[in-house]
Image (cartoon, rainbow, N blue to C red):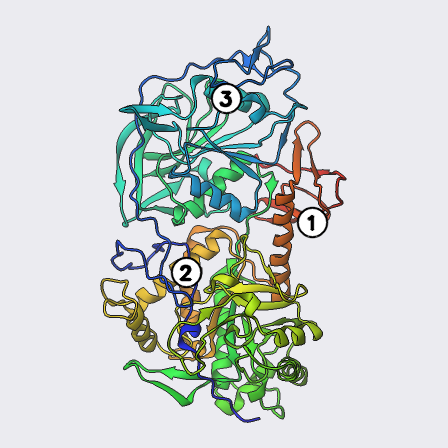
Amino acid sequence: MGRSVVVRTLAVAVAALVVTSTVRVGPGSAAPARPDTAPPSVVGLAAVAAGQELDRPEALPRRKGSVPLRRTETFRSGTDGGSARSGASTLSVAPDGAVSATATGKVALRALVVAVDESDFGLPTWTSTLDRVGAAYDVLLTRDAPLAAETLVRPDGVGRYGAVLLTNSSLLYAENGGYVSGLTADEWNLLWAYERDYGVRQAVLYGSHGTWPEDYCLGAVSEGAVGATPLKTTLTTAGAGIFDYLKPSAQVPVVESYVYRTAVRSDCSATPVLSAGNDTLGVLSPSADGRERLMLTFTSNQYLLQSDLLAYGLFRWASRGLFLGEQRHYLHVDVDDWFNSADHYYPDGHIESDPGYQMSGHDAYNVSLRQQALRQKYPLAGTLTLGMAYNGGDANLNAGNRCYPYGGVSRLTATTRCLANQFRWINHTLTHPEMNFTDYATSRAEIADNLAVARRLGLPVDGTVLKTGEYSGLGVYNPNPDNDTDPPTDYGLTASNPELLRAARDLGVKYLHGNMSFPSHKPACFNCAITHPMEPGVSVVPDWPTNIAYHCTTPAEETAFYNSFYGPNGKFPYWPANLTYNQVVSAETDVALSHLSGGSLYSHTFHIANLRDYGSGRTLLTDWLDSLLGKYSAYYAVPVLSLDWPALAQRAVDRNEHFAQLSAGVDGVFDQAAGTVTISSPRAGTLTVSGARTATATTYGSEVSAPVTLSAGQPVTIPASPLR
């Protein structure tokens, strides 16, 4: 078949998510000056580093003294359940001070986030962490909501929460010229009694030295703000045990924070978990009455790498690894337009479309070698396998099956057949048409005929997955078909091509690639899919686009293009000075690292031009991977998972069901004495439980998780595997 010259809609082809992440400084990268303004946000266009928190953190309010600890108070039968704020004690005192019968030793797999109010700086950090995991949690806004016994304990004596997560250690806010705590002294004692009687741990996102409301055994060293230049912190031996998914030698970069440098006092018992030189920035501190507490002494907003590295570990420690949901780290990379050609962007800004860029047999063979080299260099990415989205219309169906390490364009198909099992293959339609308005026959032929080419060439392709050209046919397009430069309009999934959907359904397609740069393609929950509103049998699973442009083949081309968009004189100016190639790659992989560290499942999309061997076997894509994996490996001890596309997409669909269970009120209860977890729900379905040890459980580092299938209203009891 003849070669099809595909001219991309520039706005779509270079699109990347308007990501909620800040620029992150990776190890060894020379970061450019960071702007003090938010990055440009244009629907359908690339975002460089959107979502940064521009409000600078401040010191905690100070208050002298402490809240007197009433050790003899305990939960017991006959408690009146009144509000501690009203002055009516919710606790009764047992004659011997022992835990009463109502403290059952059973706690729900649910976290309690305790904050001052909606503007509390730490609240989004906790909630975003829990939402990524898929955990069950409640938020108590203490400025207005009272804390009562029934807030913490069910009528049957089961504790409502298996983890207590404070945004900061004091919960103070300004009022009438002074500072007032969100919790009264009675409420603090109620919370502490609950933690003590039920063995529930408390994690504090931000605290300091001092004794109010209670003493964490820290003395003052110094304090102050940290800006964009990282304060490098290290894990102590105790910290490496708590955050064991991180490398013991990892240096956690603290940026854009207010930091209390402290020292553990000699007159009490506490253990540093995070340090900067000789100073303590994180502490494991048992309370005077034996409660377990873990606290950091610096601010962390939800966009910072330090939050991704540490907040999950705080939650996991507090919950003892028993919670609904799971945390994993994934790396998926797809390359579009295999066999096709690409526009070619030159450093002077002109674009060549005919003949454009054509991949060679050497380029194909080279990328297989580079993939193998990356696996060897970064053992945590030992299963990394690139996904190749192919357009079979330009394949040579009569080609042989020998690899040609130095072959040209005419050797691409033969080399592809030789490398068939080195990559994963994705149906990208036969000729890469825009499918916004294609009829049924055309849509069906594009899908089916491309699968036929794969069978002819011996490429293993799963027919349940389809990636249309430029994500077309899914409700996002420019109303002027001749406009190839302006951003497209997102009309929503209900504006999808019904004939494409019908053809896809009839051919057994279950999963369609979407694009996270389009609002209508963003799922409502983290790592989820979207059930297509026009075709419920088809799910949309979005990709992460990048700013490694589809038509760039060399560092000079990519640098010129990037700066033409985001440099000080670019179309969407953001950086105060033009970036070098190394800075472009570092900035792009900082964004990608936020996806990996946050646990994003979705794939990153590149194009065949990014696979050109521009010298010594290097390519734009493998430069990006080398930078990204270097950063990830500097921080993490657990591997990145690389699933094939059907497994990736099904996992996204499974997350939909997991969040549906949360919405339905699924309940998990850990019985400490029996060592079991009992799960029940009014809804039939499946969800993931961390700390559940079943026949289908999987391990990831020191963690174990399992899918649990439920019938409506029928409890399931399974062995629990809590972390220490």
- Identify whether 707 is placed above or below 416: above
Quadrant (top left, top right, bottom left, bottom right) of the C terminus: top right
Asked which secondary structure carries label 2, the reply is loop
For the image, the number of numbered tags is 3
The three-letter code of the residue at mark 3 reads Trp
**Where on the picture, by quarter, is residue 386?**
bottom right
Q: Determine the CA span between mark 3 and mark 2.
A: 42 Å
Residue 645 left/right relative to 290: right
Q: Amino acid at mark 2?
A: Val
Residue at the disc numbered 1: 686
x then y, percent, for residue 357: 42, 85
Q: x, y percentage for residue 618? A: 40, 75
Neighbours of disc 1 within 10 Å: few (<14), some (14-19), many (20+): many
Q: Residues within 10 Å of mark 3 (few under 14, many from 20)?
A: many
Dot 3 lies on which element? helix
Mark nearer the N terminus (3 vs 2): 2
**Counting residues from the N terminus, which is met first, the one under dot 1 or under dot 2?**
2
The circle drawn on residue 75 is none
Kindly indicate whether the residue at mark 1 contacts the one at mark 3 (C-beta within 8 angstroms): no
**Residue beneath label 2, please?**
18
**In which quarter of the view is residue 535 placed?**
bottom right
Residue that mark 3 sits on: 192
Which amino acid lies under the numbered mark 1 shown in the image of this protein? Answer: Thr
- The answer, for residue 332, to whether it is visible in the render is no
Q: Where residue 487 sits in the image (x, y, percent)? A: 40, 72
